[in-house]
Amino acid sequence: MLTKEQIMDIIPHRPPFLLVDEIVELTPGQSAVGTYTLTGDEWFLQGHFPGLPVMPGVLEVEALAQVGAVAILALPEFQGKIGYFGGIDKVRFKRKVVPGDVLRLEIVIEKIFRNVGFGSATATVDGEVAAKGKLTFAVQ
């Protein structure tokens, strides 16, 4: 298990843009599982939407990507580097994520070719799919 501080040792993201509270499973270069609890105090909920706070889908994908970046950047050859989005494909949103929800963020790295990684990502809340799709990472 990695704490928020340990996550920040691997990826460059910082609050308020760090969207992972902890990593509960990690196999470097293969997979990672993290969590993010939506408290209701997040900056992005102030305007999305007033009176009906919902986590923006694009930030759900960003949270998944941050977990994927941990999985890839935990490899010795990529330590100290940065993972950038190389692509976002076939993403679908299945349910709203609202304050009080705990997102379980799972990624399986399907392939790494040189400095590019490809993975399947799924975000769930209480076992129900919130978002899923394919992510590509470019490491520099």
Image (spheres, rainbow, N blue to C red):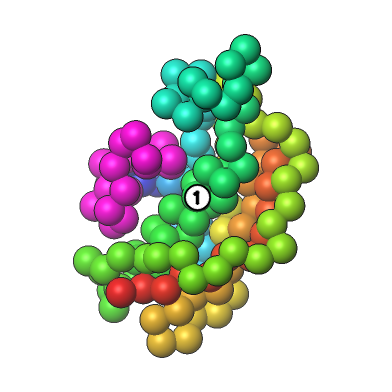
Find residue 100 and report its horizontal and vertical position in percent.
Answer: 58, 20
Q: Quadrant of residue 118?
A: bottom right
Q: Residues within 10 Å of mark 1 (few under 14, many from 20)?
A: some
The region drawn magenta spans 4-22
Q: Is residue 67 above or below residue 51?
A: below
* SS type, badge 1: helix
x, y percent for residue 14: 29, 42
Q: Residue at horizontal 58%, vertical 16%?
A: 50
| Residue 11 among those drawn in magenta | yes
Q: Is residue 90 above or below residue 13?
A: below
Q: In the image, what residue type sits under mark 1?
A: Glu
Residue 93: quadrant of the picture: top right
Which residue appears at 31% of the width and 65% of the height? 82
Count of marks placed on residues: 1
Q: Is residue 85 magenta?
A: no
Is residue 24 depicted above or below 49 in this figure?
Answer: below
Image x and y of residue 135, in percent: 57, 65
Q: Quadrant of the C terminus?
A: bottom left
Task: Give the x, y percent position of residue 31.
Answer: 52, 63
| Residue at the top extreme of this rendering | 51
Residue corresponding to mark 1: 62
Residue 58 appears in the rendering: yes
